[in-house]
Image: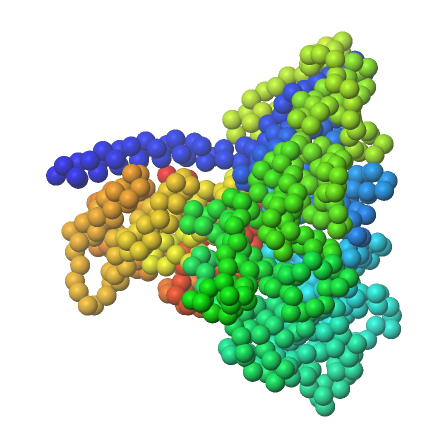
Amino acid sequence: MKNRLSGRTRRLRVCISFICIHFFISFAYAQISFENADLNGADGLLFSSGMKQGFRVWKNLYSGVLDARSNAREALNAKPRLLTCFPQKLESLQNGSFLQIRNADGVFIYASDAGTLTRMSVTESLYPSPAVFARVRSNLIETSISPDGNWICMCKKKDSVFGSIVLASTQTGKELVLVEKTDFSFTKIPVLWSPDSRVLIYEKNNRLYFIEPKNAFDPALAEEKFRSIGEGSISSVQWAGGKKLIYIRGNSVFTLSAHELYTRSLYAAMLGTGKTAGNLPLSFDEDQDSFWTDTSGTRFVVVQGGQNVFYFNCADDGRIYNSAFFSLQNGPADFSVFWISSSEETAASYTADETLRPLVWTEYFAVDGARKSAAYILDTDSKKSARLPYAHFDALALPEGAVKPALSPDKTKLAFCTEEAVYVYNPRTWTAEHIFQDEKIISFCWKNASSVYTGGDETVREWELATDTKKILFLSSAGDFMWAEDGTTVVSTVKAGTFRYKPETNTWTAAEKAAERTRQTMNKRWRIISEDRSAGFYKNLFFVRSLRGPGKTLPLLSDISDQRTEEKKIALAFEAFDNNEYTACILNMLHERGLRASFFINGEFMRRFPESVKAIAAANHECASSFYTTVDLLSDDFIIDETFIRRGLARNEDEFYALTQKDLKLLWIPPYGKTSALIERAGMDAGYKMIKNPINRRTEFLSETAKNCDGILSAQTIADICANVQSEDIILIPCGVKGSCSVTGVCDKLEVLINAVSESGYTILPVSALVY
């Protein structure tokens, strides 16, 4: 009795929390705040907007001029000018001559020689909505840039779930569609560049093709059928140096010379696909596996199923004479393999294959969803330990939070970053030769072999390694800004110093510290007013009051003040039933997107994966019930009654509380979604509200067991969901299934789904926000 009374007390706290959480959720997208207005004598206005996307928080700085016309509908005479550029993603183009910056406000190009920053495309982050949030994420999709930076491949969206693979010149801007229609992805571009940028391999309908970018826009370009390599996915091929392509089918390894690609394509029926180079002791699964090879094409690192890592050294006669292996227990997000010289060779003499050792870097999702890394290097020194085989992998020490490894253009240095620093390591000795830790790091990229572009939370800089010189190019965030004493110059102070804005180049230059001055919200003609908002996408709005003539008050931007709270909303829920393969990356993705979802947790899941349950609860996601066991409640194997249902729900509730010291919401989904009048009545008598027929099950997009990976979240499944979803629907996704589904593939599709429903104008909320 005591336990049940304490359970009822906890339920009372839960009911009260429903009210508070619903209030919070209703305004979960109130993410923008207007701050620190400064008005000069010439009606010039400075202001910042506090931005929040996922876990990222920064402040944009804007300038504008107030509109004195009597018929003005808004206070500014034009769209405000963005003076800062937040480096959410940095990419080096044309051998470092240009820096591409992508963020919530669009795509920008910084020209190194001219010192100018140009906005190439615009996404107005000042006007948020679910659809804008979706477009913002599309700004940050992965691209594939050629090693020389002259070409770029991207997946351009055709609709919510399908896209086109496009090749574009970074010099002329010309574009060529390589694949008209493919599944859209935020993380994968199915292309592979040769190290010298002369040849691009791309995948189309499970077949591989090649193209020479320099001939891409030539009217005489050979038809695609004459540029075919063979069947397979992009994971089936890798370059061995710049002249030889390695191609794996099953366990057979083939080599194709780059200069013979056209010949072999034209005469494929007679010549076959390349020269047989050897055999692997395992069958390569192009959908699940990946591989890397050295410059000779005889040594391989193969990652099987995203978990088992093999090293093979194939003799000329195709037999295996040396191998190494290790297995990863975490669900990796990405793999990178770098062939590192054991000697002090430079890139010019980087051909002695026996001196190269593979360094395997994997990024994975920890139980709590945090993205972490591990690195391993092959050791072939048998003298170190008689207990170890001749070849084995040794773990390498990494700073806490290390991610995003990038090899320098000359292949002699490896850079990676944490939130606090950018590290440049000598991979041969595995020591840090250079460390940038002047500010928190958002992103970085190599400019050339001797310098790095660093994107911090306050500045974007060019870091010259040899001299440790750090040239500030422009500001990332607003800092402590104001009009200077002259009333026309914008200055801002950050930790690196005080800087003056240069409107002719859209950049910032070092300046003397500004004289002490108080920001002004009023001049002889206008006064700036801040009004708090308790709904919509804004915490507050700026209005401008005229101080001359008949009084009038104008919104700073009429499009903002007229915006209404979105009415369309859906719930995103995850079924934590009996497998947890996807849980960690789901938590990571929700964290990155700043979303709060619901998890329906089964007792079997709690007993098998207690740390995952703790992580879900610690991330403040909504936790509800899926009964205490995975039994089919409608099975003919036994007879259930109301007491069995109520006790099963109570047991699940008590086990969750014992594990997390938190309470389950009074919501539940029966195992396999199977229900009856008796089951529903028993749950209601226990104080629970049953969630029936989520859109996935209602339309049979997901099978009850979800055995087929494509049945979980294929492109067509997402398209069907988007075509049928209505406001207040619930989308239910499993936290894992039995089988060999790709963790990263499922999570990539999940993000496509989230973006797709956001583009349709839906706000994504936990389930309780819809049912209470």
The image quadrant that residue 515 belongs to is top right
Q: Is 465 placed left or right of 401 in the picture?
A: right
**Residue at 58% in and 38% down:** 420
**Residue at 41% in and 35% down:** 22
Q: Is residue 54 visible?
A: yes
* Residue 736 placement (x, y as % from top left): 41, 59
Foreground residue among 714 and 170: 170
State which quarter of the image contains the N terminus: top left
**Residue at 61% in and 85% down:** 317
Above or below, comparing residue 622 to residue 744 in the picture? above
Q: Is 648 placed left or right of 212 in the picture?
A: left
The image quadrant that residue 355 belongs to is bottom right
* Residue 17 placement (x, y as % from top left): 34, 33
Foreground residue among 436 and 68: 436
* Residue 407 placement (x, y as % from top left): 67, 54
Foreground residue among 209 and 456: 456
**Residue at 63% in and 23% down:** 35
Above or below, comparing residue 525 to residue 505 in the picture? above
Above or below, comparing residue 8 to residue 150 in the picture? above
Q: Is residue 747 visible?
A: no
* Residue 462 placement (x, y as % from top left): 74, 40
State which quarter of the image contains the C terminus: top left
